[in-house]
Image (cartoon, grey):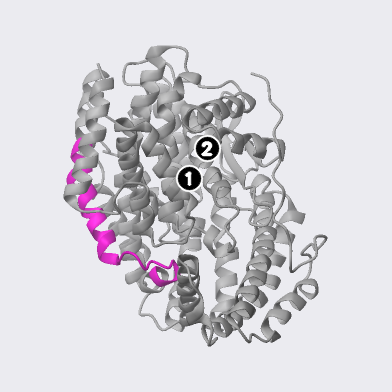
Amino acid sequence: MNKSAVALPRPRERKFLPEEFKLTVWSRLKPYYTDLLKREINSVEDLEHWISNRSELESIVSECFAWRYIKITVNSADEQAMDMYEYAVQELMPKIVSFENTLNKKLVNSPFIDQLSGDAYFIYLRLAKNAVSLFNKENIPLATEVQLKSKDHGKIFSEMTIGMDGKQLTLQKAGTILEETNRELRETVYHKINKRILQDTPQLESLFDTLLEKRHEIAQNAGFDNFKEYKFRALNRFDYSSQDCEDFHDSIAKEVLPIIDELNVYRKKKMDLPLLRPWDLNVDATGKAPLKPFDNVDVLVEKTIHCLNKIHPSFGNVIAVMREMGHLDLESRKGKRPGGYNIQLSSTGVPFIFMNATHALNDMRTFMHESGHAIHAFLTRDLPLNASRRFPSEVSELAAMSMELLSMDHWWIFFDNEDDLKRAKINQLENVLKVLPWIAAIDKFQHWLYTNPRHNRQERQERWLKTYKEFTSSEIDNSELESYAKYLWHKQLHIFEVPFYYIEYGMAQLGAIAIWKNYRENPEKAVKDYKKALELGYTKPIGEIYKTAGISFDFSQSYVAELGKFVQKELESLID
């Protein structure tokens, strides 16, 4: 496939800061915050102009911080990049946070705010008022310390490798061996991966102890009993409660886990195994070699563009633009931090995708996921307020997870063989279901962690094992593996870096299933509704955005049962 020429979008026009402005040191940035702070606002028009200028400043600052984060993830050994990132977090961020609070106070105390009209301003003011209520000066240095310290998790995992056949493999590359048909090899690699992680257990436990202590202190400084209550407010969770999260946990345990048990019974029978072990879960149940949907990342990108264009003519162009601008870093390599992300570049308006491709099926799924985020960014790049382009995770993950499922009808682009295509779809749908109990387990565990901040390591270990077992299929034999199981949560970056941000994936997964269900019934309408919902950005409450997409924001047992049975039925139609 040949690359075609693409038209690059123009960066957002600047009306407050000069086009040549680049953020380097605080002295260059401070005058713009000072201007906003001292400027007189004598009418609603003045206030709207002030908000517009402030939004532009936020976009530029946000993009600067994003690039500094990108540079430490693409090469964890880049000391200059780390110095620049740490300067931004330690020197720039505390001053910015202080000014932002003062500006928020100026906004919410303005006599003209009641004259602001439109949904975008409703959301914008709701966020500003919440930020003012949470602000505590003592938390600025604590938040800085926590942000820097939490990044140690990614650095620790980025340096982990295992030896195989005289070569050192990253854990991401080693993980693909768990898809190989040789069971003895899979078991060997499974043990090597987990033993390697255990080597850093003391370091990871100590890291979490520090983060737990600091986060509890932040919560108390802000007037909350515990960090869970504080974080729910800090995450702007206006549209659902802690009880809704608990309903999600219960619904997944009661309605999704039994389906996964059935899938594992089928897998065990198909593989002719007396016991199903953890290293048997990723291999093809029919004994076929792992799927290889692409040979290199260039092919991955080109085929993804083709696939996305089949869903909507504008979707593939998003990735083509990002490729042309150098906003893709996809290949796995030593020294690159683990995981994947799409990060907003608010001023440029073209995001950046980072991942660790090893040419496996999961890489294709990950790129489809991150492409959904990127498309979301493009669909909202012209919204006037920066706050409207900073989506709640429940919505941003809806965009991404839906793209995984919407793209499935066009995966023939990656697979010439009909049997391989069927296997890829089965793998996708199994993963759609299997991730939900893990999400529920991680979220429920975090509820306990932060409402019991004085726990010791032994209590933490016991609570995790109890929660893990509650959400683990009874058809998997984990005997003699407890030494691994009691620290499995260490793998979850979110617990360390972005606490409580994870259940959003589960909520969005349910939403994505519902969108895909609509797509199976009426593809054109489902894509139109999906696109219309994403175009809203964050100008409406979450429930209204889901409603615009033609679905419900619902975690009841009956709704989860309906969606689970739909996926199960689709799976049964694919499985011989």
Residue under the point 38% across and 80% down = 224
User: Can residue 502 be seen in this snapshot?
Assistant: no
Spot the residue most to the top. 417
Q: Position of residue 461 (x, y in %)?
A: 33, 57
Q: Position of residue 84 (x, y in %)?
A: 74, 61
* Element at label 1: helix
Name the residue carrying label 1: 197
Name the residue carrying label 2: 171
Q: Amino acid at mark 1?
A: Ile
In the picture shown, does residue 536 fall above or below 125? above
Residue 28 shown left or right of residue 198 in the figure: right
Instruction: State which quarter of the image contains the N terminus.
Output: top right
Q: Amino acid at mark 2?
A: Leu
Residue under the point 65% across and 72% down = 54
In the picture shown, does residue 301 fall above or below 548? above
Q: Position of residue 545 (x, y in %)?
A: 39, 55
User: Can residue 321 be seen in this snapshot?
Assistant: yes
Q: CA distance from mark 1 to mark 2?
A: 9 Å
Residue 144 shown left or right of residue 372 in the figure: right
Residue under the point 37% across and 47% down = 549
* Element at label 2: helix
- As for residue 236 lying within the magenta part, the answer is yes
Specify start and end residues of the magenta stretch as a single range: 232-259
Instruction: State which quarter of the image contains the C terminus.
Output: top left
